[in-house]
Image (spheres, rainbow, N blue to C red):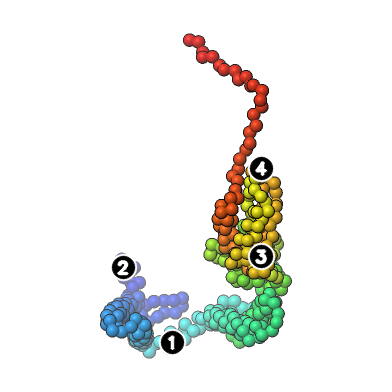
Amino acid sequence: MRNILSWITSNIRIGEIELSFSPLQVIIRFILPLSGLFILYKILLYLSRKVIYKPKKLNIKLKKNIFKYTRLGLRIIFLAITAVLIANFFETEIQKYMLSFWNILKQPFFSSGGTNISIITVLLAIPVFYIASWSAKATKGFIDTTVLNRITIDESTKFSISTLIRYTVLTIVIVIGLSIIGLNLSSLAVIFGVLGIGLGFGLQDTVANFFAGIIIIFERPIKEGDRILIGDLEGDIVQIKLRSTIINTLTNESIMIPNRKLVGDNIHNYSYKDRRIIIINKVQVSYQTDLETARKVLLRLSEGCPYVIPGKDSEVRVAEFQDSGILMELWSWIPDSTQKLKALSWINFEIWKQFKENGIVIPFPQIDVHMDKQTVNIPVESPAED
């Protein structure tokens, strides 16, 4: 108990620096007033919400704006009083403490050649990366809307150009920003090279995905907006990154696929050069069916399909003579691969409807059993004797 009492009433020490106040003084003079101020802020915010949203004559949008600015004003007052509490707590020694804190932040924890990395360096690097990311996205959007949309090149080429510009701007801004905050990039290059050799063995998949992303950007096997099928996964490409590609599936699920799978595996790209595709509706008819009548019905309903390309002739094929019936296929052109499921479903509904109206039978699986005319003697067991 004495040790705790002694600690709470003694001045705080941080390393070799001794502060002029104790933990008890921190609690009484700073934490308690700040807690009371925060509780008061929450109460005023609650009362403001009640008062502002009570009148029924004001529309909801005006109420939201009034409450937003009221909350902003209360926050400014809270921060101002907090600054006064801090200044009052440290009093005249605030400058000494700020200088000591600044020296701690400037103390380098890593040095190599002419490069010193401190906490300040790390903190300054955060806005550099943020500005670089923002500049790259803004440049890409500007190039897309003002330059690439006015020249006659295909979408995949536009995607490659805009993506290359984005990463170029990102790299340039990062290099300039890190140079401004005092990092010697020539010495860092050696460090990153050594680290790269070590990390390369542990991050082989990440490195493979990175270079696969570069291959996708330059070779353009896929682009954003394409409908693809990879394995059992079918969906639209939402975003292509250097490490992975985001696909929105037919069931509206977002899935991230490593880029190395998109480069190394077979990909069915429905919209690589032409978004038009042929859909195939398969249906069985019985062996008693007039195939010419069935063909005409299939062609007629295909012409009435709202998803089929007008003027593009459909085709009916007899695919196979199967055990239960004759397999027929209707081949139809649709303008966009994204309409495949809707078109298949629409035509299947019409096949069922039109076949019933025209007396065309869709057979179910069946087996014909032929019995031999010869009599087959089957022995009958006699009941067992007691």
Residue 328, x across and y down, in percent: 67, 52
Left or right, 320 with reference to 42: right
Q: Quadrant of residue 282?
A: bottom right
Residue behind mark 2: 2
> In the image, what residue occupies the spot 65% across and 32% down?
370
Residue 87, x across and y down, in percent: 37, 87
Q: Quadrant of residue 118?
A: bottom right
Q: Are marks 4 and 2 in contact (CB under 8 Å)?
A: no
N-term-proximal mark, 4 vs 2: 2
Please tell me whether mark 2 or mark 1 is closer to you in this view: 1
Residue toward you, 369 or 204? 369
Q: Secondary structure at mark 1?
A: helix
Q: CA distance from mark 4 to mark 3?
A: 30 Å
Residue behind mark 4: 323
> In the image, what residue occupies the spot 59% across and 76% down?
110
Residue behind mark 3: 333
Residue behind mark 1: 96
Q: CA distance from mark 1 to mark 3?
A: 79 Å
Amino acid of disc 2: Arg
Q: CA distance from mark 4 to mark 2?
A: 95 Å
Is the residue marked by circle 2 packed among few (<14), some (14-19), or many (20+) residues within 10 Å?
few
Task: State which quarter of the image contains the N terminus.
Answer: bottom left
Q: CA distance from mark 1 to mark 4?
A: 95 Å
Task: Indicate whether 373 appears above or below 385.
Answer: below
Is the residue marked by circle 1 packed among few (<14), some (14-19), or many (20+) residues within 10 Å?
few
Amino acid of disc 3: Trp
Please tell me whether mark 3 or mark 2 is closer to you in this view: 3
Amino acid of disc 4: Asp
